């Protein structure tokens, strides 16, 4: 292989900066956080910040010896994963584009396609993890079954089918586990759709709500978030398919997820759910685009999108899952 043709394309890489598909919400749950190495450690905290020290802190004069408080420094490891996909610009494509001077635009189209694949992979990876009840303590999952009290589907307008009570139960569990209010609530599209038809939710939007009153799914989650005092909220609209002509499947299903993400704190020191860690060091930030003329071909060029990243769970107690909300 002739490596002199292989290089990072800084222009195409810069096109990725700040790119975000508006349908994808994974970054609300895993905010991005740069790390300088592919393998490393970070400091972890438990409940040290919430210990009441008033008994040993007050009543100390200027000339008295203060009591010392401390805690053990614990660490947890992380390891980034490699991600990569490529696309080729064929001779036929080149011959069709060169007369009109569209080769640079064709490269951008290829990179855009690869970046959409990366974004979709991120979205689905996060959604799959969030919906796996094995990632939670049993007390942090409410699997609705339409049988037991507190577990009625949101689609039912009967006594006990109350999303407000179920969300409040989740908030109370999180406060008990991490000592903080959640700051993020996520709804699958089907969950938001049936929430908009639930009488208890409609009463939040109107002083008097008849069964015939209608509200939109977005209005439903907006009033639920405001009622719960949760500032960040979103509907998971995204779908995926396994072929160009395949059937679409909802990525976020019919869940409601509540958690503390600490979105505005770029640190792992708080009682937060997790971070998307990505490699960033002097001269290189991922994801990045590379170009190479393929040896043994008649001028075939390959563009490659590579990333080194991982969705790292910090504290599973900072999330609460309600599933089967839209079952009937």
Image: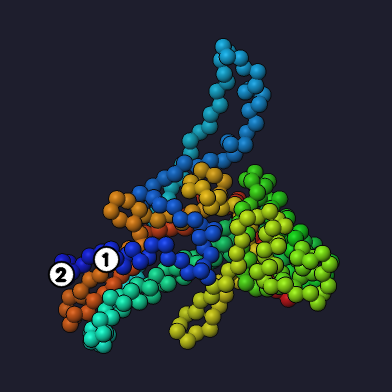
- Give coordinates of residue 231: x percent, y percent: 63, 55
Q: Between marks 1 and 2, how big is the CA–CA gap? A: 17 Å
Question: Can you tell which quarter of the image residue 218 is in?
Answer: bottom right
Residue 2 marker: 2
Q: Where is residue 158 in the image (x, y as percent from the top left)?
A: 83, 70
- Report the side of 161 relative to 3 (left or right): right
Determine whether, in the image, residue 139 is placed left or right of residue 213.
left
Q: Residues within 10 Å of mark 1 (few under 14, many from 20)?
A: some
- Above or below, 291 relative to 169: below
Q: How crowded is mark 2: few (under 14 residues within 10 Å), some or many (20 or more)?
A: few
Does 276 sit left or right of 198 as displayed? left
Q: Is residue 61 above or below residue 40?
A: above
For label 1, the residue is 9
- Residue depicted at x 21% and y 67%: 6
Nearest to N terminus: mark 1 or mark 2: 2
Q: Which residue is drawn at 22% across and 65% down?
A: 7
- The image position of residue 192, as x and y in percent, is 67, 70
Dot 2: element: loop
């Amino acid at each position: 292989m002739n490596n002199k043709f292989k290089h990072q394309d800084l222009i195409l890489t810069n096109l990725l900066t700040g790119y975000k598909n508006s349908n994808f919400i994974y970054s609300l749950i895993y905010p991005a956080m740069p790390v300088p190495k592919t393998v490393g450690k970070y400091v972890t905290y438990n409940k040290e910040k919430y210990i009441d020290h008033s008994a040993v802190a007050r009543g100390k004069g200027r000339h008295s010896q203060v009591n010392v408080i401390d805690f053990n420094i614990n660490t947890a490891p992380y390891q980034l994963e490699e991600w990569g996909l490529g696309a080729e610009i064929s001779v036929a494509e080149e011959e069709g584009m060169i007369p009109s001077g569209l080769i640079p635009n064709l490269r951008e189209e290829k990179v855009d396609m690869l970046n959409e694949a990366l974004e979709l992979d991120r979205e689905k990876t996060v959604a799959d993890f969030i919906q796996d009840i094995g990632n939670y303590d049993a007390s942090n999952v409410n699997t609705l079954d339409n049988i037991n009290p507190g577990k009625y589907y949101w689609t039912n307008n009967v006594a006990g089918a109350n999303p407000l009570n179920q969300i409040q139960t989740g908030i109370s569990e999180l406060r008990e586990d991490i000592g903080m209010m959640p700051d993020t609530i996520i709804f699958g599209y089907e969950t938001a759709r049936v929430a908009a038809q639930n009488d208890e939710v409609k009463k939040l939007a109107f002083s008097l709500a008849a069964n015939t009153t209608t509200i939109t799914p977005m209005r439903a989650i907006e009033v639920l978030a405001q009622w719960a005092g949760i500032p960040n909220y979103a509907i998971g609209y995204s779908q995926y398919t396994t072929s160009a002509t395949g059937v679409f499947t909802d990525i976020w299903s019919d869940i409601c997820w509540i958690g503390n993400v600490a979105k505005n704190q770029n640190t792992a020191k708080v009682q937060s759910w997790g971070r998307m860690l990505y490699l960033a060091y002097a001269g290189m930030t991922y994801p990045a685009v590379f170009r190479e003329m393929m040896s043994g071909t008649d001028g075939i060029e390959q563009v490659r999108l590579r990333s080194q990243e991982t969705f790292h769970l910090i504290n599973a107690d900072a999330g609460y899952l309600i599933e089967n909300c839209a079952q009937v």
